[in-house]
Image: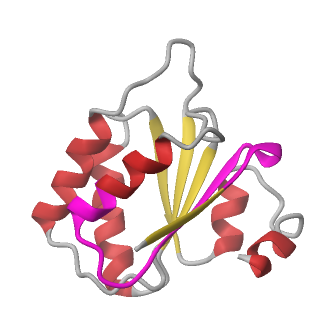
């Protein structure tokens, strides 16, 4: 299951990928999010997979990377950042594989982090300013 919050004032999208979620489900839910009226390609993203139960295989990661390569890029869109929060070794490793497969080939930069503070800092947001938002989420 994927939940998300779009914060237009912060130019930020927060995504939580939890439980048993297949790559196909993930792609379907991300496509639906992109249809949200508040969505903008120009927003940075933090994807938290702390509670993801599914173990994505190498083939799954390649499939996700290939999907990311096909995303439409609006003319004049800026290169955004997608920070992945993956504290567990198993998800950190597969996320790093995704990072390596996509950087330079997709319309955003990918970074993988063990905690929210590092992810927020990397995308240029003050972790303290978003603390209340994260608690509410």
Horizontal placement of 3 versus 37: left or right? left
In the depicted structure, whether residue 57 falls above or below residue 60: below
- Name the residue: 38% across, 46% down: 31
**Hey, which quadrant is residue 56 in on the image?**
bottom left
Magenta-colored span: 6-27
State the residue in front, 104 or 7. 7
**Hey, which quadrant is residue 98 in on the image?**
bottom left
In the depicted structure, whether residue 33 falls above or below residue 90: above
Considering every residue shown, the one lying at the far left of the view is 59
- Name the residue: 56% across, 21% down: 77
Say which quadrant the C terminus sits in.
Answer: bottom right
Say which quadrant the N terminus sits in.
Answer: bottom left
Considering every residue shown, the one lying at the far top of the view is 75
- Name the residue: 57% across, 37% down: 80
Horizontal placement of 50 versus 13: left or right? left
> Where's residue 4, x and y in %?
57, 62
**Hey, which quadrant is residue 17 in on the image?**
bottom left
In the depicted structure, whether residue 113 falls above or below residue 61: below
> Where's residue 117, x and y in %?
71, 71
> Where's residue 22, x and y in %?
23, 70
Magenta stretch encompasses residue 12: yes
């Amino acid at each position: 299951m994927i939940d998300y919050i779009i914060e237009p004032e912060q130019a930020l999208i927060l995504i939580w990928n939890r439980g048993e979620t297949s790559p196909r489900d993930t792609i379907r839910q991300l496509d639906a999010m992109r249809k949200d009226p508040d969505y903008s390609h120009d927003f940075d993203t933090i994807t938290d997979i702390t509670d993801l139960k599914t173990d994505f295989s190498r083939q799954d990661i390649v499939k996700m990377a290939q999907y990311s390569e096909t995303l439409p890029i609006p003319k004049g869109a800026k290169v955004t950042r997608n920070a992945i929060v993956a504290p567990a070794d198993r998800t950190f490793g597969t996320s790093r594989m995704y990072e390596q497969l996509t950087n330079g080939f997709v319309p955003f930069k990918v970074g993988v982090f063990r905690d929210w503070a590092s992810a927020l800092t990397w995308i240029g947001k003050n972790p303290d300013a978003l603390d209340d938002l994260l608690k509410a989420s």
